[in-house]
Image (tube, rainbow, N blue to C red):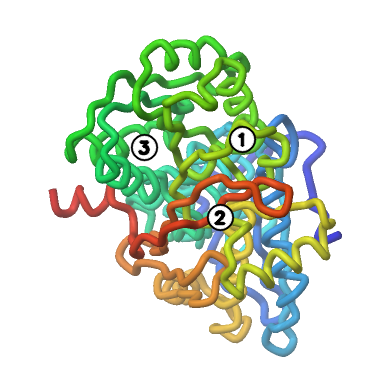
């Protein structure tokens, strides 16, 4: 059943070199031996959000199982996995330091949470350590981060075009409800900008604390405001199901209020747990397990063969798959003798024309992913709910960076 993650039983405090010493330490780890390339993967493997880390891990592990043998002669890859336990930048940074200095990895990857990823990204710059981000969606992850590339997405990529779409469809008012951390702030800002600049009005904008478990009071205020739209973002997984159940319980489901949001709110693996509440919900996102692209059909079939017929990949899984492909492609391009400079020179020009999500590439200047977005509607197909792609939007990078460059 794929590669089992190595998880620390506890996070140990080590006496490590200062950040100034890490760059020196990396001199001895930066060039891989011809036979072994070490990849350090930091994800959440324990706690309430471990299911999201598992989705990324499984996507990466599936790629390794199917394609990992396609390496230069005499080259092997050792993947060292560590558990950040959740949103905890200090823990994530310490684990990255351990991987660089003690384990002498050649590449870092994972990157489930934006705060953790930002902490590791800053370290990667000082240590000149390539870092492939598979999950985090905050726009600032790739800012001032010359050793970072992203194979996931940004919330601006989905939220900004969704605001344009909603305004063009004639919706006039929106209530915004997002989880209170960096990606939620990005989603709020992006949707607000495009919706209001095209004639829409935001009647209220609320940030829900990440530790909140009772969403009914928030949904009651939405119902009382009676907007045309409820725009939502949450990080997916169990939180997405909790949001949807609250929408149904308070009576928003089936009302005149159209629920829209980023793809996280109807994440593919959680749809079976949501009942009928998500029916008709509109999202914009870069991946759907229900997509009929040939590459995705093959990906989903391989996933179900490996992890079970009732298991479903999500956008986190595609980020893990593509991230690991990028890493292996960089190793192959360097014939197994990887260096930080050689790895980044390759990754900053990397592309995959046949990803499960469609063609993708990395923007050389920013390290940001360029990809299609899809307008999706939750529909019932073959007795189960699915995110059906109804419109393909043009390939785009991160709109936030474009606006900063060309205000």
Residue 119 at x, y percent in the picture: 48, 41
Does residue 77 appear in the picture of this structure?
Answer: yes
Rendered image quadrant of residue 51: top right
Using the image as rendered, state which of residue 261 and residue 13 is in the foreground. Answer: 261
| Quarter assignment of residue 70 | bottom right
Residue 300 horizontal/vertical position (percent): 70, 64
Name the residue that disc number 2 marks.
134
Residue 90, picture quadrant? top right
Judged left or right of residue 100, residue 352 is left
Q: Residue at x 55, y 50 (%)?
A: 135
Label 1 and label 2: CA atoms lie apart by 18 Å
Distance between the alpha carbons at the discs numbered 1 and 3? 24 Å
Mark 1, mark 2: which one is toward the viewer?
2
Quadrant occupied by the N terminus: bottom right
Of marks 1 and 3, which one's residue comes earlier in the chain? 1
Near mark 3 (Cα within 10 A), the count class, few <14, some 14-19 or many ≥20, is many
State the separation of the CA atoms marked 2 and 3. 18 Å
Q: Is residue 19 visible?
A: no
How crowded pointer 2 is (Cα within 10 Å; few <14, some 14-19, many 20+) is rated as many
> Which numbered circle lies on residue 186?
3
Instruction: Name the residue at 64% across, 47% down.
Output: 380
Q: Which mark is residue 91?
A: 1
Extreme residue in the left direction? 407
2 or 3: mark nearer the eye: 3
354 vs 174, nearest the viewer: 174
Residue 68 in picture, x, y percent from top left: 72, 75
**In the rendered view, would you say 47 is above or below 34?**
above
Q: Secondary structure at mark 3?
A: helix
Circle 1 Cα neighbour tier, 10 Å, few/some/many (<14 / 14–19 / ≥20): many
């Amino acid at each position: 059943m794929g590669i089992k993650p190595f998880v620390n039983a506890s996070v140990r405090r080590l006496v490590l070199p200062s950040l100034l010493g890490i760059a020196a330490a990396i001199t001895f780890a930066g060039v891989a031996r011809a036979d072994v390339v070490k990849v350090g993967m930091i994800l959440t493997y324990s706690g309430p959000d471990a299911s999201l880390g598992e989705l990324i891990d499984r996507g990466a592990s599936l790629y390794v199982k199917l394609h990992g043998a396609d390496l230069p002669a005499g080259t092997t890859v050792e993947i060292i996995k560590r558990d950040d336990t959740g949103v905890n930048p200090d823990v994530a940074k310490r684990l990255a330091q351990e991987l660089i200095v003690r384990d002498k990895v050649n590449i870092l990857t994972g990157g489930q949470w934006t705060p953790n990823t930002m902490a590791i990204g800053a370290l990667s710059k000082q240590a000149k350590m390539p870092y492939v981000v598979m999950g985090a969606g905050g726009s600032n992850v790739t800012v001032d981060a010359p050793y970072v590339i992203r194979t996931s997405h940004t919330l601006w990529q989905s939220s900004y075009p969704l605001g344009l779409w909603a305004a063009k469809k004639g919706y006039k008012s929106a209530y915004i409800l997002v989880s209170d951390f960096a990606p939620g702030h990005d989603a709020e800002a992006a949707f607000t900008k495009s919706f209001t600049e095209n004639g829409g009005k935001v009647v209220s904008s609320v940030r829900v604390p990440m530790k909140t478990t009772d969403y009914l009071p928030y949904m009651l205020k939405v119902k009382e405001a009676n907007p045309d739209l409820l725009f939502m973002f949450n990080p997916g997984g169990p939180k997405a199901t909790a949001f949807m159940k609250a929408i149904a319980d308070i009576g928003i489901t089936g009302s005149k209020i159209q629920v829209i949001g980023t793809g996280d709110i109807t994440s593919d693996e959680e749809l079976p747990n949501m009942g009928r509440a998500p029916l008709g919900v509109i999202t914009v996102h870069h991946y759907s397990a229900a997509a009929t692209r040939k590459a995705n059909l093959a990906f989903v079939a391989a996933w179900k063969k490996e992890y079970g017929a009732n298991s479903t990949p999500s956008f986190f899984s595609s980020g893990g798959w593509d991230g690991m492909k990028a890493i292996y492609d960089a190793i192959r391009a360097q014939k197994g003798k990887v260096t930080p400079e050689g790895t980044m020179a390759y990754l900053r020009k990397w592309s995959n024309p046949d990803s499960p999500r469609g063609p993708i590439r990395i923007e050389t200047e920013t390290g940001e992913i360029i990809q299609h977005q899809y307008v999706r509607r939750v529909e019932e197909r073959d007795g189960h709910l699915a995110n059906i792609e109804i419109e393909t939007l043009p390939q785009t990078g991160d709109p936030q960076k474009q606006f900063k460059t060309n205000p």
